[in-house]
Image (cartoon, rainbow, N blue to C red):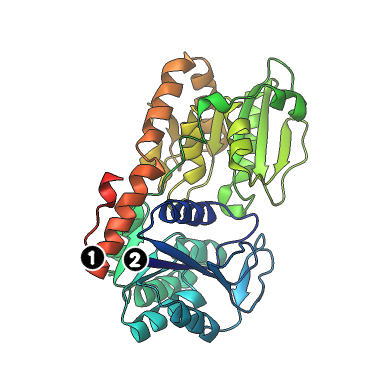
């Protein structure tokens, strides 16, 4: 089976979607019965399995590039002749995937990685949200199957009238992200004192991540707490904040996360929450907002989920304090066990089985 992914959400410093595609490629490449190709508008990946199409930089997007037309992507897909195509964004390349799939007579899936209507509402209010909802309905109704990484995203798509939607969680490499990665040398690199408690956030420093709520939590927690921000974008300059540039090397990222006491996330628009899952795999409890997909990942067994309607800075600070006052060993163990349910070695066979069903092929991947 030849699987081809097409997306504009693949850049040198991109996060969850790139990680998903890298893990998919690694899994498929290890099995002789599969082939994987990628059509991208960037140079973020190289190899004979990648086809780059003409594009221009997308301003203020952390390295993403915008295809200048759909036809180059269609031609690339036609030349690859895959058995199934997956579109990983809702823009130009999704329409190219549909056109190529129709021409080749092969199924096309759409993976709903980003909640476009919610983003539109934040940028342009209710009118923009309604336009985005109509667009999402029109686009995703044309796919042979739509994969969504969380129950809330499945429900949202179905409420818009999109059919053939399936919940398909993403995963984590629990062999890379594990508690044993802890390296105390990180404390010296970060310039923190021996008794300081480390909070960590990993991701883009984008408006929807609500970093000001994390700063408010720091204010309430007071001295002895340091927030480590790992990623790219504008961040506050404060003595209790350490900014670490994007870490593409996953063992090194896991080492930093495993060294921290609590993972914190104030965002309320996550479609899955991969960074939180990676923290749990490292045995780090999570404090997040009880909203969108994070409400499905985080609870009192692995950390705390604070209500979205209360002042988040204060609520998150109180949750962090309560966690740090507990015996952390059971919490760390529970976080690790929950992450193990999402190991890529469990998730990838599910995804490939979906592809095989669409292609009308038998699959034995569930035994791998």
What secondary structure is marked by label 1? loop
Circles 2 and 1: CB atoms closer than 8 Å: yes
Name the residue at 59% across, 37% down: 251
Q: Residues within 10 Å of mark 2 (few under 14, many from 20)?
A: some
Residue 77, horizontal then vertical, whole percent: 46, 78
Q: Secondary structure at mark 2?
A: loop
Q: Can residue 308 be seen from the camera position used here?
A: yes
Say above or below: 111 vs 70: above
Q: Position of residue 247 (x, y in %)?
A: 66, 44
Question: From the viewer's perspective, is 260 left or right of 38?
Answer: right
For disc 1, the marked residue is 361
Quadrant location of the N terminus in the rendered image: bottom left
Judge left or right: residue 138 versus residue 36.
left
Of pointers 2 and 1, the one earlier in the residue sequence: 2
Report the front residue among 289 and 73: 73
Q: Which percent across, then down, holds residue 315?
A: 51, 32
Q: Which mark is residue 252?
A: none
């Amino acid at each position: 089976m030849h699987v081809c992914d097409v997306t504009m959400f693949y850049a040198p410093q991109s996060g969850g979607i790139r990680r998903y595609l890298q893990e998919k490629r690694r899994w498929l490449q290890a099995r002789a019965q599969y082939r994987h190709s990628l059509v991208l508008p960037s140079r973020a990946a190289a190899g004979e399995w990648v086809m780059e199409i003409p594009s221009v930089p997308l301003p203020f997007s952390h390295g993403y590039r915008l295809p200048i037309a759909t036809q180059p992507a269609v031609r690339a897909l036609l030349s690859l002749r895959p058995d199934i195509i997956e579109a990983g964004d809702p823009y130009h390349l999704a329409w190219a995937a549909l056109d190529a799939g129709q021409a080749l007579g092969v199924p096309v899936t759409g993976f709903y990685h980003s909640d476009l209507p919610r983003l539109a509402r934040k940028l342009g209010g209710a009118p923009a949200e309604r336009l985005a909802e109509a667009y999402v309905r029109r686009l995703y109704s044309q796919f042979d199957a739509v994969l969504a990484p969380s129950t809330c995203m499945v429900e949202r798509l179905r409420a818009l009238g999109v059919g053939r939607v399936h919940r398909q969680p993403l995963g984590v490499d629990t062999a890379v992200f594990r508690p044993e990665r802890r390296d105390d040398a990180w404390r010296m690199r970060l310039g923190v004192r021996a008794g300081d408690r480390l909070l960590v956030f990993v991701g883009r420093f984008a408006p929807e991540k609500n970093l000001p709520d994390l700063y408010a939590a720091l204010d309430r927690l007071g001295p002895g707490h340091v927030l480590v921000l790992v990623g790219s974008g504008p961040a506050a300059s404060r003595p209790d904040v350490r900014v670490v540039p994007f870490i593409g090397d996953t063992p090194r990222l896991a080492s930093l996360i495993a060294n921290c006491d609590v993972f914190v996330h104030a965002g309320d628009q996550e479609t899955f929450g991969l960074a939180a899952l990676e923290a749990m795999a490292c045995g780090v409890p999570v404090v997040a907002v009880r909203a969108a997909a994070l409400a499905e990942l985080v609870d009192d067994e692995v950390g705390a989920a604070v209500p979205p309607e209360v002042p988040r800075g204060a609520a998150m600070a109180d949750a962090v304090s309560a966690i740090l006052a507990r015996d952390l060993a059971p919490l760390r163990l529970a976080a690790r066990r929950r992450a193990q349910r999402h190991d890529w070695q469990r998730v990838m066979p599910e995804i490939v089985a979906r592809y095989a069903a669409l292609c009308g092929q038998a699959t034995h991947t569930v035994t791998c």
